[in-house]
Image (cartoon, rainbow, N blue to C red):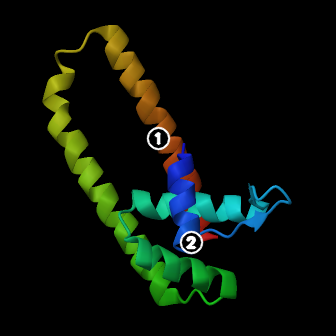
Amino acid sequence: MVSKRTIDYYTSIGLLKADRSKSNYRIYTDESLHDLKFIEECKNLHFPLDEIKRKLEMRKAGNICSSEVDKHVSAVTQQMKQLYSDLFDLFPILDHLDDGQKEQLNNNLSLLRSALKKSLVKVST
């Protein structure tokens, strides 16, 4: 969920484009919605806004080069390593969970594994 204030900020710095209605309301296209999703994905990978803007511009121009993809894959891989390390640190705590908590954790991890597999398939195709 992205706040109105955040969307207004993205629009003011040129990350998002909006048309104006006769009443001066901002109107965002489907393309802007896709851009917003891309921006949020980049933010989750801790890219600075100026880097996100550059990536958006390259994406729109169709100039995404293999080095950019490699950088992105490298950043995601590093983040996955950190998350795995964080999970490994949590393993000793698992012994203290009751069966319901363990089952919930397993369900959550299963959903994450499934999402990761789908993401990896997208990257490889």
Looking at the image, residue 49 lies above or below residue 59: above
Q: For the residues marked 2 and 1, what is the alpha-carbon distance in whole angstroms?
A: 29 Å
Residue placed most toward the observer, 101 or 20: 20
| Numbered circle sitting on residue 112 | 1
Name the quadrant containing residue 78: bottom left
Residue placed most toward the observer, 47 or 97: 47
Quadrant assignment for the N terminus: top right
Helix, strand or loop at label 2? It is: loop
Looking at the image, residue 54 lies above or below residue 74: below
Name the quadrant containing residue 46: bottom left
Query: Marks 2 and 1: which is nearer the front?
Result: 2
Helix, strand or loop at label 1? It is: helix
Name the residue rendered at 27%, 49% in the picture: 84
Horizontally, residue 83 falls left or right of residue 48, namely left
| Numbered circle sitting on residue 15 | 2
Whether residue 88 can be seen here: yes
Quadrant assignment for the C terminus: bottom right
Q: Position of residue 85 (x, y in %)?
A: 20, 49
Q: Earlier in the sequence, mark 2 or mark 1?
A: 2
Mark 2 surroundings: few (<14), some (14-19) or many (≥20) residues within 10 A: many
Residue placed most toward the observer, 115 or 49: 49
Q: Are marks 2 and 1 in contact (CB under 8 Å)?
A: no
Name the quadrant containing residue 38: bottom right
Name the residue rendered at 36%, 69% in the picture: 75
Horizontally, residue 34 falls left or right of residue 89, namely right
Among all residues in the image, which is located at the extreme right?
Answer: 22
Mark 1 surroundings: few (<14), some (14-19) or many (≥20) residues within 10 A: few
In the image, what residue type sits under mark 1?
A: Leu
Q: Position of residue 9 (x, y in %)?
A: 51, 62
Q: Position of residue 114 (x, y in %)?
A: 53, 43
Horizontally, residue 107 falls left or right of residue 31, namely left
